[in-house]
Image: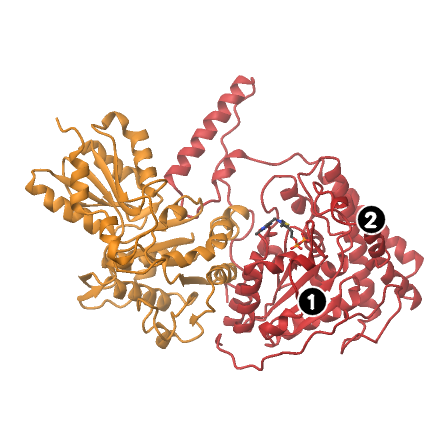
Chain colours: A orange, B red
Amino acid sequence: MTLQSTISPVVARPPAALTMAAALNAAIHDSMRDDPTVVLFGEDVGPLGGVFRVTDGLYAEFGETRVSDSPLAESGIVGTAIGMAIYGLRPVVEMQFDAFSYPAFEQIVSHLAKMRNRTRGRISLPIVIRIPYAGDIGGVEHHSDSSEAYWSATPGLTVVSPSNPADAYSMLREAIASDDPVIFMEPKSRYWMKEVLSLPVQTTPMNTAVVLREGTDVTLIAYGPTVKTALATAELATAEGLSIEVIDLRSLSPFDDATVGASLRKTSRAAVVHEAAQFGGYGAEVAARLTERNFFHLAAPILRITGFDIPYPSPKLEEYFLPTPDRILAALGTWEWS
Amino acid sequence: MSLNVESPVVSTAPAPQPLRLIDDTGHAVTDNAGDFVLPDPGTLLGLYRQMVVARRFDVQVTALTRQGRLATYPSALGQEACEIAAVASLDPGDWLFPTYRDSIALLTRGVKPEHILASFRGEWHSGYDQYEHRIAPQATPLATQALHAVGLATASKLKQDSTVALTLLGDGATSEGDAHEALNFAAVWQAPVVFVVQNNQFAISVPLDKQMRCRTIADKAIGYGMPGFYVDGNDVAAMYAVTSAAVDRARTGGGPTLVEGLTYRMEAHTNSDDPSRYRAAGDVDVWRRRDPIERLDTYLVSIGALSDQERAGIRDEAEDLAAATRECMMLPVRVDPLELFDHVYADPRAALAEQRAFLAAELAEHAALAGQPPATPSAPTTPSSSTTPAGAHA
Ligand SMILES: Cc1ncc(C[n+]2csc(CCOP(=O)(O)OP(=O)(O)O)c2C)c(N)n1
């Protein structure tokens, strides 16, 4: 199914300033209106509209048949979504916060990811699991995890993370239309970012990375919450005469080797930025595969600027944990520049 | 249709003794039958035939496993009444969510031996067409499949279809969180689903009293607000009467039911298990005397519904199936290494195409070294059946 075919029937709306939360809401709304098999359920997604209001108004419009508060059990949410998908529905489910997706780990890893393979392609599970993730919102413990490495390391899952409202709309629509299960990672700190959009908007395909800002000296790779940090770093760097190219990965699995590799071969230096801990983190995969494929184009080792290898800290300590433009620039300064 | 249902909460306690219609000695009994009545002789004869055939298959596959010709096989010997009653209660359009233990349920629903054995031979994880048979892949992660059954049943309800889902679970699996979540979701959503727990009294080596302090597993139904039935799981008449009533209730909007069949696993957990380490041979003998097939045989003979000639005919059918099962082991193992990459994603991935090409080149090199003609590169395979989900057309 192409994105075009799923978007076209939706009536065009006049330009309006939309938050990422509102863009996500519109994406679910439009997908539900276009496809009667799309159903939505999870914790508090009904009358309340979700704790981040991403599902606001959907219960009122589509009713209990298609939008429902489920019992409070994440494994149950994913497990029942799997059964519904076997019967031809397209469930969109919400994990209320990143760390609360862990009870669903077994259903996601042992069934959601593997069903197509186990059944030799007979059973597709077109399910979207929305996970609000990452920190920088002053959240108490278990409300700021970045769990993308777990999902990205699991064959069978597609893992994406938008960084702006336009992508949030376009990518979520594409995720819902996809026949593969998609882990849709929503950066909580960006929920309130506004952008003027005329919906429906279609950005580049979900599985591709984009160069958000061109540069010649360094490729800075980010996704989700750290895209903003990377763009701010690039801005600051111009004062130091450093030209940074910023890539928004958008898709963590699959990884867009072509786009990122082309940028790296141009700049010959790369760094990857994420909030999650460094050890075994997503950046390790980025650095390893880019090095394997582009070693002779590299002028310096690929750097990772990430959270420390510690559990996500308390609100008053998170500023020391999160990667900042200063920290990124300092890291780039450790390279030998000849 | 909506998930929000006004329905009375059911809280009748299951009977303290297992519900039964035919006792160990093959006599019809009514003292602990609840409202259930004996199925008619024709139905019972059909169940008898299916149990005999299923047992012959099970014994044959266990033998093949002992010969080292299958990687593993979890036997259901002694549990035929639960397995066959569950399957016999379903309409062809209903869905079954089985475990590794339930191969004879698959057989009884019409899956060919070669397709059942594909997984135990190590050819592929699930070897049959799930949509053709309306059987989910046999689940190994305990109790996970129960949630899938609830989800499918709920989808059926949302679409206002009449499809019912039935899931089989072991007693040990009821300790898992997913079992609780499945029972609770089913009750809250009033999903048309039936949970059949085969209480064979052991989870590998661990007896049920180490799993729970409840009197019976069926008692837990009270807590969830659904009917629960504690049934003699070696009495196929009772298992069939209770389970088919539960399926009917689910189909007509009455919501879920928990059925516990008290039975016994006569074989080891799998071929690699040693039951002598955790249970006495005498216990097995006690349960051998409660055999589900023997007692039904006695009963059917007593009412004149099973002649020697009919029994011989059924045994011949079972022997034919055993022969066919042995024969399918003669078929070469059918694996295509390049198929490894074909069913991971619907949306093809460049990285997998690269890895597939790598393996193809490696295979060609090995073939060349062995002096064989290079294998013709196979095109990516497509599923051998329709990929349209049942009910998706609605
Ligand atoms: C989640 C999970 N934990 C552990 C296992 C390993 N395991 C396989 S079968 C089994 C015992 C299950 O016992 P029960 O549910 O009573 O079913 P039975 O095998 O007796 O049919 C165990 C522990 C598993 N398959 N899944």
Q: Earlier in the sequence, mark 2 or mark 1?
A: 1
- Of residues B27 and B313, the one nearer the viewer is B27
Residue to which mark 1 is pinned: B216
Q: Is residue A272 left or right of residue A218?
A: right
Q: Is residue A274 above or below residue A133?
A: above
- Work out how far the residue at label 2 is from the one at label 1, CA to CA, in angstroms: 24 Å
Residue to which mark 2 is pinned: B281
Quadrant assignment, res B19:
bottom right
Label 1 CB less than 8 angstroms from ligand 1: no
Say which amino acid is labelled 2: Ala
Mark 2 secondary-structure assignment: helix
Label disc, if present, on residue B189 of the rendered structure: none
Say which amino acid is labelled 1: Thr
The answer to whether the residue labelled 2 contacts the one labelled 1, judged by CB atoms less than 8 Å apart, is no
Image coordinates of residue B327 in percent, x first then y, are 75, 39
Binning the other alpha carbons within 10 Å of mark 1 as few (below 14), some (14 to 19) or many (20 upward) gives many
Residue A49 in sight here: yes
